[in-house]
Amino acid sequence: MTKYVLLLLAILWGFFVTESHYVGGYYYSSVTMKISDINPNLLTHIYYAFVTVNADSSVTIQNERKGLVKPLAELKDSNPDLKLLFSLVNNNGSFTKVASNETLRASLIKNCYQLLEKYNYDGIDFDWEFPSLADIVNFSALLKEFSEKFKKHNYLLTAAVNPIPTRSYGYDVPEMAKYLDIINIMTYEFYGSFSAHTGLHSGLYPSSLDSAYEKKYLNIESAIKNWANAGAPKNLLAVGIPFYGRSFNLKNASNHGIHDPINGIARPSSPSYLQVMKNYSDYNTVWDEEQQGYYKYLNTTWVSYDNDRSVRLKAAYCVEQGVKGIFTWNLGLDDVHGEISGVKQTLLQAMNDGLNKAKK
């Protein structure tokens, strides 16, 4: 009877997640999305954001008083195949300190293992932004020791990583690939407060206007190639899709295309997808054919963003490239209730649609 109830629930939600590809989503405490709003059948993995790693190797669950950890695990009642992971973050250099000390590494592993056992979660994600060259050996050692403990209990180990997989960023890619089950490439924020000109912050392909550096590093196509060339098997790689945009102040309202000069970021600097669609509806909307993405502009405000069309294209591209799948930061930034298109969790549904259609 239980099997049929679960099947009925899945049908009522609308669609099953694609069977053969990974679809991950980070859940960060949000007023726009309750846990009951999440469709667990559109995801294979959910990351609880965040658990802070302290310098003494202790761990602190962020927003624990909101009581989100257990209800998130209860989504497995609707999708027994769903995997739940805690995403670990730094605390003023705590990763560097813990990773460099064998005793602290062992203590962190123990603390994380106890978390998983207590809350019925399935793994740990490292969101170390970012290790440096000085951390490269210790980061690999940390992953190795986690893996040795976790594999015995079928727990997962993942990491969110910089799109640029160089040793200067603290990545020994072949070594990391030995121990990680999924490598989540953060293929967003290609352009931001550090930029001198406009650009799609999560472009699929390079622009013909890009510098050699931008073409090599600042697009999804290059990120996949670079991580694969550095020694990561493609079946470990996942591409990040942001459910938010990046906004900039144009220096001149008349110059509003790709690679036009900017005067820093506009506010809000990272509007959610829903905010973009509601609050910028009167803006000029441009589809950039080269990079397969959207931007909007009005007066001196310029916003790069993804919508359901560009998300489907990215998902289909990932299938073509043979990577493990896709993930998003973060679930609560979607059009959760379908206010714009009538489709609940619009972008998450588009991720699934793109994967499924590309398989056929």
Image (cartoon, rainbow, N blue to C red):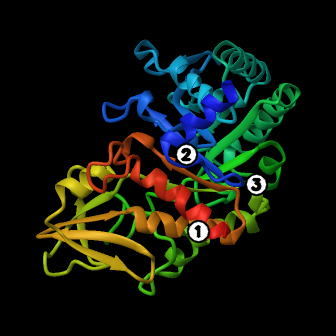
Q: Is residue 270 visible?
A: no
Number of marks:
3
Image-quadrant location for residue 195: bottom left
What residue is at 20 percent from the left and 51 percent from the top?
A: 267
* Foreground pick, 108 / 281: 281
The alpha-carbon separation of the residues under discs 3 and 1 comes to: 25 Å
- Image position of 194 (left or right of 248): right
Image-quadrant location for residue 317: bottom right
Which is more N-terminal, label 1 or label 2? Answer: 2
Q: Which residue is under mark 1?
A: 316
Q: Which residue is under mark 2?
A: 42
Q: Residues within 10 Å of mark 3 (few under 14, many from 20)?
A: many
Q: Quadrant of the C terminus?
A: bottom right
Q: Quadrant of the N terminus?
A: top right
What residue is at 40 percent from the left and 16 percent from the top?
A: 66
What residue is at 49 percent from the left and 56 percent from the top?
A: 241
Q: Residues within 10 Å of mark 2 (few under 14, many from 20)?
A: many
Residue type at mark 3? Val
- SS of the residue under disc 3: helix
Q: Position of residue 279 (x, y in %)?
A: 17, 54
The alpha-carbon separation of the residues under discs 2 and 1 comes to: 16 Å
- SS of the residue under disc 1: helix
Q: Position of residue 140 (x, y in %)?
A: 78, 41
Q: Which residue is under mark 3?
A: 173
Q: Is residue 131 above or below residue 156?
A: below
Which is more N-terminal, label 3 or label 2? Answer: 2
Q: Are marks 3 and 1 in contact (CB under 8 Å)?
A: no
Q: Nearer the viewer, mark 3 or mark 1?
A: 1
Residue type at mark 1? Ala
What residue is at 14 percent from the left and 76 percent from the top?
A: 252
Which is more N-terminal, label 1 or label 3? Answer: 3
